[in-house]
Image: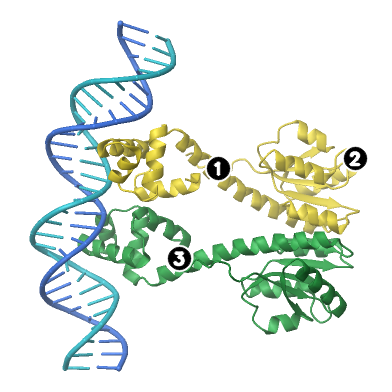
Chain colours: A green, B yellow, C cyan, D blue
Amino acid sequence: MPAAKDAEPQLILVLDDDARIRRALDSLLRSVGHRTALYESALELLEAPLPPAAGCLLMDVRMPRMSGLELQARLAERGEHPPIVFMTGYGDVPMSVKAMKAGAVDFLIKPFRDQDLLDAVDLALGRDRDRRQASAALASARALYASLTPREAQVMALVTSGLMNKQVAGELGLSEITVKLHRSSLMRKLGTRSLADLVRLAQVVGI
Amino acid sequence: MPAAKDAEPQLILVLDDDARIRRALDSLLRSVGHRTALYESALELLEAPLPPAAGCLLMDVRMPRMSGLELQARLAERGEHPPIVFMTGYGDVPMSVKAMKAGAVDFLIKPFRDQDLLDAVDLALGRDRDRRQASAALASARALYASLTPREAQVMALVTSGLMNKQVAGELGLSEITVKLHRSSLMRKLGTRSLADLVRLAQVVGI
DNA sequence: CGGCCAGTTATACCTAGGTATGGGACGGTC
DNA sequence: GACCGTCCCATACCTAGGTATAACTGGCCG
């Protein structure tokens, strides 16, 4: 594991149909050292795959063709997506509640102070880092687990549930020595050097 | 463990300064089988300890003396509290966003359909059940852990980190046999019958 | 067909874990 | 002072875990 020294700063996706606002947000965000990517419509953003470095999506709620809320729903359907900060000039309460229930980080009413926006963006970037960390840990655990043969996975499940080798052998109709063999093999594959580590890995994978 | 057969249905705390609204909410909630407790002011609710069966707090945002948002903040300071559903006739977006950021389940605008309120309450009760389950599991794990002597706790930490008995002995300056003794003693106290169980318990406690 | 991998088992040997029994030291409590 | 709980160590014995080596089977692939 090369320890991803966050050499790649997070990117802030800015989506607004008004070019003047895009420019203003872009310059504000860049002035405090953020990197940005600008989008004019929800469709433009949906068509291309999201930049892997995307750490926050900042967007207007009301836009022609596809609203911010609908984009939020589409992104959620597709799986993981960066945390979202909404802005709007004409928001109502049900709209903001819906956005927040769906996981938005903040919902800002124009006009807002620059600092409020920057705070919301920082919060979103923080959540994105947490999300990335959790997701990377889960992915690597799953990848390791996927390298096991079916038998090894069975043995792992029973061993981490607390059964002794002979009990595992009984459950699976094997001899104890075979269980030991699968066990040492899966420990090697997973890089775990103790039963404690194995149990924790199993927890992550969700056995 | 007597398996708490949820013989005790959850209680819905209804807080509104308007007596007519309290009565209307009370009758609506009771008509679908919920149990309720009525409060006239935030202070009244804060003064007495919360009913242990409280599974949801349904309240107006705007009330004299103490607002719903302030009550929400006070309850959060005091630790765990039931999930909150807000209602209001005059809410603005920043208010609703603040409430949702602080963890509210929903923020309803009057007039709302009865069903919307009942849905929000059901969602809140569901979250309360999850919360109770997690909190009960954590409490029982902590209680078990607290019954260990200091030495046993040290041994547990090292054993669950994956060290062998002899390594634990080295770390603590003990002989291996003594470690085994502490180990069997703590396993007995915690009711764990395998290292796997012990590791999971340690995870819950946060070792 | 030959090679490879998963899966299976066996023998043998060594290490680690678990328990029973007994004993000594220390600190606090009744 | 007697008692108790915690902490420590030892001997002895048994069980469980781990590894090495070797061998057999069946399926898949080039």
* Secondary structure category for the residue under label 2: loop
- Most foreground residue, A75 or B129: A75
Q: Which residue is mark 1?
A: B136
Q: Can I make out residue A44 in this image? A: yes
Task: Tell me the residue at 79%/61% (across/down).
Answer: A97
Q: Which mark is residue B64?
A: 2
Of labels 2 and 1, earlier in sequence is: 2
- Most foreground residue, A205 or A190: A190
Chain at numbered mark 1: B
Q: In which quarter of the view is residue A87 placed?
A: bottom right
Q: In this image, B89 relative to B181: left or right?
A: right
x, y (%) of residue A163? Answer: 32, 53
The residue type indicated by label 1 comes to Ala
- Rounded to the nearest angstrom, the CA distance separating label 2 from label 1 is 36 Å
Q: Which residue is mark 3?
A: A141
The residue type indicated by label 3 comes to Ala
The residue type indicated by label 2 comes to Pro
x, y (%) of residue B175? Answer: 26, 37
x, y (%) of residue B125? Answer: 67, 50
Q: Residues within 10 Å of mark 3 (few under 14, many from 20)?
A: some
